[in-house]
Image (cartoon, coloured by chain):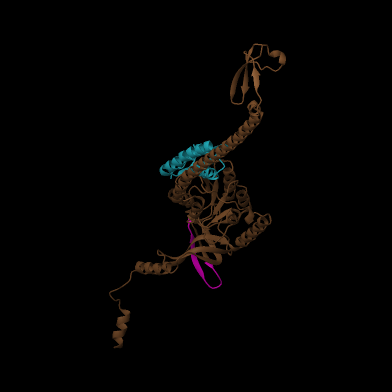
Amino acid sequence: MSTIAEDLTRLEEIVRRLEADDVELDAALALFEEGVARLRAARERLAAADVKVQTVLEEADGELRVRDLDE
Amino acid sequence: MALSLFSDLMTPTDDVWSVTQLTTAAKRIVEGSFERPLWIRGEVVGCKAWPSGHWYFNLRDAASQVRCCLWKRDVVRGAKPPADGTEVFVLARPGMYEAKGEFQLNVVRMLPTAAIGQAQRELERVKLLLQKEGLFDPARKRPLPAYVATLAVVTSTAGAAVRDIITVARRRWPGVRVLVVGARVQGDGAVGELVRALRLVNRLPEVEVCIVGRGGGDREDLAAFNTEAVCRALAAVRVPTISAVGHETDISLTDLVADVRAATPSAAAELALSDQRDVRRALDDLASRLAGGLAGRTRLGLERVERAGDRLQAAMEAGLERRRHHVARLAAQLDALSPLRVLERGYAVPSGPDGRVLKRQAEFRPGEPFTLRVADGRVDARVEP
């Protein structure tokens, strides 16, 4: 699943390419569709998001263990 | 008269103070006179660690002395009471011990002046070394990413820093994942734990920014953040770093090594995380640019098609014109070659009953009919018998 950050970064890339004029019409349409989907996903995620807090511990065998942190 | 005066002064009036009232008032005056703890320099006498864990001692100089106590919670783990005559700095709040009516200092921090000198020299050494190696170089500083999905925080899990950062994150950027990598930030073992935690951050591939620091509400011991080991571990973190050592005025060496310095952990979170209101605005902007981009692209496509149509039309027209010329030229040639033109000049072409053109005398048989083709028609004829 993409993150809001990834969505935003990709959206900026899509818009830049669409604005650049040298993209074929078929590709432009595909970019536009992807952009709309990313936009919707980012807005939904922003609305639903809650800060996730976790701690990382290193086990004796060197493995990392991530667990949710109760506040 | 004299007697009366004497009796006024020497006889208790109605408003007699109790001892407790007095010590309470004195306490209020003493404690109200100092807004914040003071650093006081003096010589320790009679310092003793009691079974309760508290330390009691006197602090003196050439002329005066004052009772001091250092509560258990402020005693550095594993520390031993200093010997008589040790010169120290203490950070203390002046107060009253009401039960004994004693003026005393509530010490929260005690540092031998010799250690301070040593610590200062060590700090200067590390600073100079790291500076020479270019670890403070502005050219090394990396920019913070625009949008952070995963943030690492190296600090004490029990400290105020984590809480402060989470509070800011909730408000500004609720989409963020905060990975707390716990480490003691002061006292024995702090350096080793901070180094281990910073190295551990490099094993978390999803982390995009790392905040290292400690809460502003904690006691203000920056020593671990001034060590060579912690500075080097911080410099080796693969993502942009923010140092937030919870102290507005003092600068720690990690502040100089980190890509960004923040005054407090809250300020660090503010710097690391975008404001969701800005992000909503950015999304609106991207939405309109997206629509505009496609519209522009479509218009461009249309224009291109129109241009192509125009060229096609022009090409077709040019082709037709060429063909028209060609046909006219061919027609002129045909015209010149036409036998009709010859007939115009008075010649005639004879042809037999089978339609064959009669070219030789022998082809004319006496009595036989033939046709003469002249300019404007045909004439039937017969060879004389």
Chain rendered brown: B
Chain rendered cyan: A
* Residue B174: x %, y % from top left: 44, 46
Q: Is residue B341 left or right of residue B38?
A: right
* Residue B311: x %, y % from top left: 57, 39
Residue B180 in view here: no
Which segment is the magenta one?
B59-71
* Residue B34: x %, y % from top left: 45, 68
**Is B339 in front, or is B77?**
B339
Up-down relation of residue B67 to residue B280 (above or below): below
- Residue sticking out furthest to the bottom: B1
Up-down relation of residue B47 to residue B342 (above or below): below
Magenta-span inclusion, residue B69? yes
Up-down relation of residue B36 to residue B294 (above or below): below
**Is B130 in front, or is B40?**
B130
> Which residue sits at x=55%, y=67%?
B42
* Residue A53: x %, y % from top left: 47, 43
